[in-house]
Image (cartoon, grey):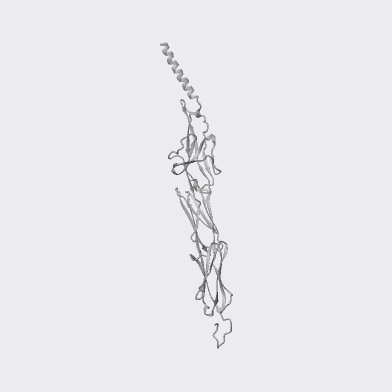
Amino acid sequence: MMSRSNMSMDGILIFVIALFLLASQPHSSSAEYRVSYGPPASGYVGGTAELSCRLSWLHNNAYGYDTIPSPKPSGQWFKLQAWFQTTIFKSLDKRFSVAGDPQKYGCTLQIRELKGADAGIYEYRLDGTEERLVKKQGILLSVYATPAISTTTNVSLVGQPTMVHCEVRAKPRTTLSLLCMEVARNQTRTSFLWQLAMVDIRFPAKRGGGTCSCTLHDARRNLLTSSIKQLYVQDFPSLHVEPTILLANHTISIICHVFAYVPLSLVVHCEENSGQTSFVSATNDQTALSYLNFTVSAQQSGTACSCGMYKDPGKKLLATTKLDLDVQCGFICLSLFPCCL
């Protein structure tokens, strides 16, 4: 009986020693690390986005959960691509950086100078883990475009009604502002959903044009993104005749010209026998010039001449300028001879 009792005591002692040795093993070898993400991230082209990430660990032994910190494991960021392939950021360029306090197991990814191609699902994976992305894991990054500015017409004319429109897919509680030639309008979005924010202004175009800027601010008036568009306002063409005094049976020139902010064409036309036309295409910030030469007769006094300004040669008519010819006789009329032959 004593031998059996001694054997059972020895077995209990061995079991206790085994538990002690098991409990004394380094925690890092049996710690279970987990990755947790923040809410889906978003940003605008050219802006900055932050993908919140944090590592946590637990180690369970016979006495409960350990509280002694374990060494932070190494890991890398992956991005989900088409056909479920992944791209690993082995060497992050200057736009990507991993932030966070190592003592707090930070693994947050910061992306600067956002591009549209940065949108997608990202996952932080510990070294040695499975390479395939687990379904419903990772964090979604949405990248939105900058505000788009457009005008009602391709070419704004002096004094003509002009509307400038700006739109962008905006966050809730954001303010979209449009400023053109010292005229501003604001529109605030307070929805709890992402939506298309739009704002426009209507005004008579002024000579010389100006710059239109569209900005998007958050509820604290922090600038999220902006766009700038140069608004060119095209003047009407000028039409005149040389010489200033028209004499019958003399050659005259009908001249049309305008300073062009956009590529356009001018066409000069006179009725009756002067149906010839000529045009010239102007490039940006150059003078467009068109003219017509012919010999005028006394019968052409009162003839209407016009200059048409086109967006493209022979296509969309933008404006027309007109004048009437005033032809005078070049000699004193005699009763025996007809005047201005």
Residue depicted at 51% across the width and 43% down the height:
50
In this view, 276 is above or below 32: below
> How many tags in the picture?
0
Q: Quadrant of residue 326?
A: bottom right
Quadrant where the N terminus is found in the figure: top left
Farthest residue, direction bottom: 336
Quadrant where the C terminus is found in the figure: bottom right
Instruction: List x then y, in percent, for residue 118.
Output: 50, 45
Instruction: List x then y, in percent, for residue 226.
Output: 53, 52
Residue depicted at 54% across the width and 35% down the height:
102
Instruction: List x then y, in percent, for residue 335.
Output: 55, 88
In this view, 94 is above or below 104: below
In this view, 176 is above or below 258: above
Q: Quadrant of residue 334?
A: bottom right
Instruction: List x then y, in percent, for residue 169.
Output: 47, 51
Return the residue nearer the eye: 99 or 104.
99
